[in-house]
Amino acid sequence: MLAAQKNHPMPQARSRAARTRRVLPAAAALAISATALTAALAAPASAATALTAAGSARPASGRPASAEITTGRPGPAATALTAALTARATGRPASAELATASAALAHGAKAAVTAAGGAATLARPSHRQAPASRTIRVTSLKSSGRGTLRWAIQRANSARGVSTTIDFSVAGTIRLLSALPPVSASVRVNGLSAPGYSAGRPPAIAINFARHAGLRFAPRSTHSQLLGVAIENARGNGVTLDASAITLNADYIGLTPGGAKAGNRGAGIYAFARSRGDKIGLNTSGRPGVVGNVISANAGSGIVLAGSSHDTISANRIGTSPAGTARLGNGGNGILISHGARDTEVGGTDYTNPATGAANNPTGSKGTVPPVFVVPALGNLISGNVANGVLISQGATHNMLNGNFIGTTASGNGALGNGGNGVWIDRAARNSLIGCKFVNNPFVYYNVVSGNRQNGLRVTSSDNVTVQGNFFGVGANNTTLLGNRLNGIQVAGSSRNTQVGGVIPLGNVSAANGRNGIDLAGRARGFVTFNTFGGLLAFKGAAPNRNNGLLVTATGGDNLVRTNVFSGNARNGIELAGYARGVTVDPDIAGLSTNGKSRLANGGNGLLITGHAHGNVIGGSLRSVIPQNTFSGNKGYGVVISGRAHANRVFTSFIGTEILGVKPLGNSRGGLLISGHAYANLIGGGKLPANLISGNKGAGVTLTGGTSRNRVIANFIGLNRLGRRLPNTGRAIVNHGRRNLIRRNRT
């Protein structure tokens, strides 16, 4: 048995011996090739001489080293040497390939050959080297053939494991006779290399797809780039992203290099769910005015993220001319984010010009210093589109907008508009528009959402949306009026927990809009508006909304109106109508300036509660820079309760005085009016003074015929906060209703 084992090795031993016999020539080839390549590269020889030296170096097997490598175990070294041996076919020097091969061979030989008990075995070569790279040059503008873009993409796709740059020796338009092959390897299509191109200028290379399919980055094309190319007239999408980490920059998608319409029949850019981490537009300099891509005049939306995630969309012009001064709209939305797309940043948070050091400060530090205007460098201009500027829908989540101008010109101070809403968030939770952080001055990287043909922002059946530090209806300069045709902000459907604003400086401006500054409707619940300028510029004068500063018809309840200024509007500062219920208004200003010391009248009433609105609370114990509700200086009444409104309470409110309750800033028609068939409302109650109703023209409190079971209790009427006389010009209380209770008031 022992003899048999000696004369007939086991199969495992035979296999090991066979591998050893195969490995030794390959190892020798690696070592000899490394030496030959190093010597060739060090000598002042031509590329051809280096190729000959590398290819003819012979180990003990008697075969060229290249044959040993390619018939052994190919890896980075084999790939690099093969590229070097064929480099002359491309018409460019082989030195880059030789350098890669030399480094890879030298490193791989050391890792590959090990000694153990006198026997040589082959370990796997290291795979930590950077991928080999090469450059292919396009020399023809024809549709096909050697030197064309098609030929270059085909060659790049065939080189697995090699990153390819496609440069251009020609400039002009490539008119295709058939679709290009999809890009299926890591490829940098570098239109920036075309003759005549310079940074910041239009592309020098255009691809006219002539109604054939557009350019597609297929699943294996991760880390590819499309730079400085115009994509025109594709049958479907201009560019389709089906791989991750794709970069598109300095491209025109839907326009010719001259800026004329040449729209693709689908979207400009379409990213599928498997595509993530893409960069659409770059501005690494941080300078204002740098344009990433121009994506305009396409039949579909400008950009579609259909389930894609972790993307950035920065410094693009979407739906406008390259200069950002004229409409060249996409037929759908500017940007559509849908099908669960998540964690995308549209814009960015840069707000300082690195060339000058100036930082955007559109309010002049809340009116204390001269304002400074710097366009946020990473923001997109999204205007002129047929539908919405941005639509976030179908479960898309955790997407954020910073520093974008949506509906304006590139300066932010002229109107181009989008045909729908500036931004529409529909059935998509936890998305946000953020214009500053708590530590910043207000609005430093604001979204300016103005001049649109519907609402500035519309939120429907979407939970936990956050809106802070933005302009809706005014220009970036905090002066020009660029109203959205409908509301500045509308929250509707079953939306829950929408946060509009926050502590200073996180409030928003919603002014100069065709209807209301904010419209809260449907079954919305848990809504908060906090530090909103509704009907006025930020820390400045009036910019009237044509209806109300705030209109609430929502029936969801648990809605809070806190520390806002709703002044300067054409009608009412605040209106609760329909079947609005569960609204708390505390503490707010309606009819005065932001400091509460001068008039900024609403054309109607400070607060109107009408329709069947019920169960609402006007007043409370919240304290901030506004100490209590102040409804003063309005052209109508301070507060009106009318229609069939019932079971509402008004307390801890000043009606007709400045914010400190000492001096008069009266309402023009009277203090408080209860009219129509309003019933069972409570004005005051508790300790004196529950409300201060003083300094108004007309009566302090009026209850008309048809009202019933209302109570007016424990108010100062005609006195200031200190109990001194501050009379209304009319009677203290006029009661023509039925069963209304008037008691414990001081007049």
Image (cartoon, helix red, strand yellow):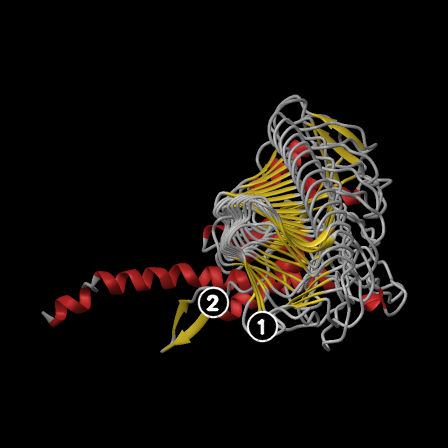
What label does residue 104 carry, if any? Answer: none
Select label 1 or label 2 by which is in front: 1
Instruction: Give the quarter of the image for residue 53.
Output: bottom right
Q: 23 or 673: which is nearer to us?
A: 673
State whether residue 116 is above or below residue 179: below
How far apart in space, not on screen, are marks 1 and 2 (Cα)?
77 Å
In the picture, measured across the screen, residue 541 lies left or right of residue 246, that is right
Which quadrant holds the C terminus?
Answer: bottom right
Instruction: Give the quarter of the image for residue 652.
Output: bottom right
Q: Mark 1 points at which residue?
A: 621
In the picture, measured across the screen, residue 692 lies left or right of residue 182, that is right
Residue ID at (81%, 67%): 597
Question: Which class describes the residues within 10 Å of circle 2: few (<14), some (14-19), or many (20+)?
Answer: some
Residue 537 seen in the figure: yes
Residue 87 seen in the figure: no
State whether residue 315 is above or below residue 688: above
Q: What element carries label 2?
A: helix
Q: 346 or 690: which is nearer to us?
A: 690
